[in-house]
Amino acid sequence: MGTSRGYKMPTGGNWTPLKNDARDFVQGTGGPQITSANVVTDFVRANGGFKSLRRGHGGSAPAGSSSRSGGSAAIGTARNLGAFLASVGQIGLEATLRERGLEALIGKSAADVSDALLDEFAGPASTLDNATAREALADLRDELLTDADTFADVEERLQAALDEFGLFGILASFFGYYVFKLFCRNFYEDWLKKVGTSKTTSKLREIQDYITSSLRAKLAGRKLGSTNWKGAEGTRLAEDVLKETLEVFGVTT
């Protein structure tokens, strides 16, 4: 689920009431009003909402640093993923790989293909920003390609996901994983100290289940306003998906 080792949670502003609510949530002392929905909404707001995540100003900071990581890498990753999946939906996996100069992956195992695409879309985990986006994409990959063994399995799973959730829904799921990874980086170690491994795992699962179910209920099948993923238009499309993803959690700016 990711940890916050080596990172320090921001302080002040909306972070103080968020930390109090998160503590009550994990300890079960906050009553029925402290729910996973409340905690996720407060967390996104404390991170600065869409404007901050779009610029790359959400999440934890390295200890001793005033900078904060965030969504700039996630936007780039979503743009790359969106362009790829849009092409797969139109011309298939093999032709898409050839178009992108990745024909060496054709016929490879599902593990080889998925690992190479992770590198292609997210790049190295060279910063906290990149690492968070990469972890989110890895989780999405594991979800979409569950039990895939062969190259044919990869195409079948991707086409099935596009049919079931649509491109918008898949990208929203990526951003959902991204928000969850940011949450884990801030609260995982703190919760371990407070309640131990078992309860921390259980409560983080509640957070993740809320994020996933909410996005699936409201955004699966939503259509994108454009199919042009090149340059600035691709960035705008990814930002549109991020904005609507955060609106599901009650954060509109």
Image (spheres, rainbow, N blue to C red):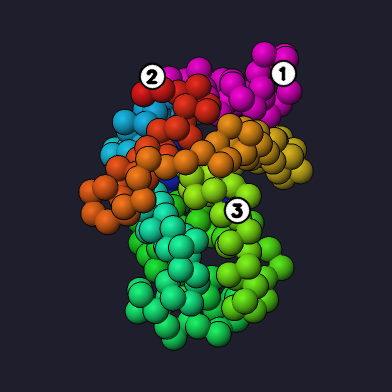
Q: Earlier in the sequence, mark 2 or mark 1?
A: 2
SS of the residue at dot 3? helix
Kind of residue indicated by mark 3: Asp
Outermost right residue: 198
Query: On the picture, is 111 further left or further right than 77?
Result: right
Circles 2, 1 touching at the beta carbon (< 8 Å): no
Relative depth, front residue between 178 and 234? 234
Residue with the mark numbered 3: 163
Query: On the picture, is 92 further left or further right than 31?
Result: left
Query: On the picture, is 244 further left or further right than 232?
Result: right
Question: Looking at the image, is 59 positioned above or below residue 94?
Answer: above
Q: Residue at x 26, y 47 (%)?
A: 233
The quadrant of the rendering that contains the C terminus is top left
Kind of residue indicated by mark 2: Gly
The alpha-carbon separation of the residues under discs 3 and 2 comes to: 42 Å
The alpha-carbon separation of the residues under discs 3 and 1 comes to: 42 Å
The alpha-carbon separation of the residues under discs 2 and 1 comes to: 23 Å
- What segment carries the magenta color? 13-42
The mark total stands at 3
Q: Earlier in the sequence, mark 3 or mark 1?
A: 1
Circles 3, 2 touching at the beta carbon (< 8 Å): no
Q: Residue at x 48, y 82 (%)?
A: 105
Residue with the mark numbered 2: 13
Q: Residues within 10 Å of mark 3 (few under 14, many from 20)?
A: few
Q: Can the viewer see residue 211?
A: no
Q: Which mark is residue 29?
A: 1
Indicate the quadrant where residue 61 lies: top left
SS of the residue at dot 2? loop
Q: Is residue 31 magenta?
A: yes
Q: Residue at x 42, y 72 (%)?
A: 96
Q: Which mark is residue 55?
A: none
